[in-house]
Image (tube, rainbow, N blue to C red):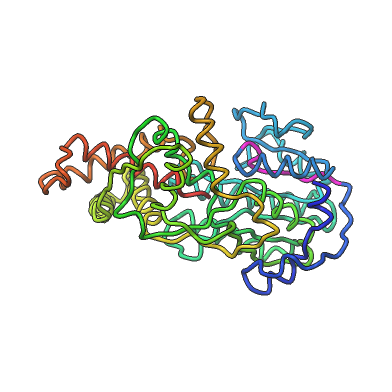
Amino acid sequence: PAARSAARPCIRHALQQPTVQALRQPSMQILAKPGPVVVLGATGYIGKAVVRELLQRGRPTIAFVRQGSNSRVPELEGATIVKGDVILDRGGHLSSALTGASGVISCLSSRSGSPEEVWQIDYAGSKLALDLLNELGDAGAAYVLLSAVCVKTPVLQLHRAKLAMEQALANSGTAHAVVRPSAYFKSISKQVPNVVAGKPYVLWGDGTHTRCNAIGQRDLAALLVDCLDDAHSLNRVVEIGGPGSPVTPLEQSQLIFREAGLEPKYVRVPLGWLDAITGTLEATERAVPDSAFLRDFAEYARISRFYATVDMIGPSDPQYGREQLAPFYAQEVRLAKDDECKEESLGLPASSLLASLMATALPVTFGLVLLLLSPVPNGIGTRGVLGSAVLAYSELFQRAHL
């Protein structure tokens, strides 16, 4: 940690454009402020890594977690844990945490992707913390927002909520940085336990229509903390991807099979199904515009179609590319073989494969009612078609990171 901190690059140059090509330049020495840093979403996959990074650098840290969240997480040991309401601050716990704070790193993200929740969490929760930081924090306190590279194609409510928060930061006068990662290693590894268990890997189409260069958990956490220290020189967006060339879902699966020592086997689901499912749900949404239930499931369908058809790529930089995808997959395979794979709170999408299945089984089933009269590919039968589609649909939810 000390070596990483000592070599911390100057991020401000990179932000003249949304890239990190200049992150290896020597940094100005910026003294850490005495007030604590408040991490929002501290029990999530990235949030807890940010807490660990701050503690390793000797920074006083407050881990703010939602009521009911499990705060007994090893990465949070040494931090001050505060539980409260991040949306309305009922009880005043968020206000107390931000009093005298030197900065905020917001890793808040919706877990379901429903329109109501993304505006409550990704916008309102992060915006409330910004307002309270300006009112109660140290003079010159800084704010770092974890966003996502996918907001550049704003077709989902998630994208619009995150962009609204980015704009609120830009208009606030607060020293800030917005970090847009491509994807996380963990978010493209959700099929590892199935592969280890001998099940086929589920692909949409031939598995070559999209690419991503995901970034490791610790590398992203280091960048977020570096941005907090350089926020007064930033006030812009940083986009970041992981090391190496972007990989397709097919290439990801081949890495997993190789690390598992298994012959590849696949279930391929036609991409056209996504359009049919989404179109059916959107038509139903328009027919019953007052139904929040239908509106949510239409949005779930749009989420899955988006992440099935859009690349997730950010600029790479060696300073934040120390973690590699193949060793990460090897570790996940070992954990799966030992039955020790942990479900992580990745924000959107739902934090477990089971949750995704439950969230998407209904819209998939509903959409496929119209499709089951069509020829069944590969002769796998109606039950196999439906099961494969549900699994593939849920995998798209897991692949979405934000």
Tell me where residue 229 appears, x and y as whole percent: 79, 57
What residue occupies the far bottom of the structure in this picture?
16
Q: Does residue 387 appear left or right of residue 155 in this picture?
A: left
Tell me where residue 197 appears, x and y as whole percent: 39, 30
Tell me where residue 78 appears, x and y as whole percent: 79, 32
Q: Does residue 49 appear left or right of residue 379 in this picture?
A: right
Range of magenta residues: 35-43
Q: Is residue 155 magenta?
A: no
Q: Is residue 41 magenta?
A: yes
Give the residue drawn at x 72%, y 36%. 93
* Picture mark count: 0
Q: Is residue 71 above or below residue 172?
A: above
Tell me where residue 325 appears, x and y as whole percent: 55, 49
Give the residue drawn at x 46%, y 65%. 153
| Front one among 322 and 109 | 322
Q: Does residue 167 appear left or right of residue 371 in this picture?
A: right
Give the residue drawn at x 56%, y 59%. 244
| Front one among 107 and 140 | 107
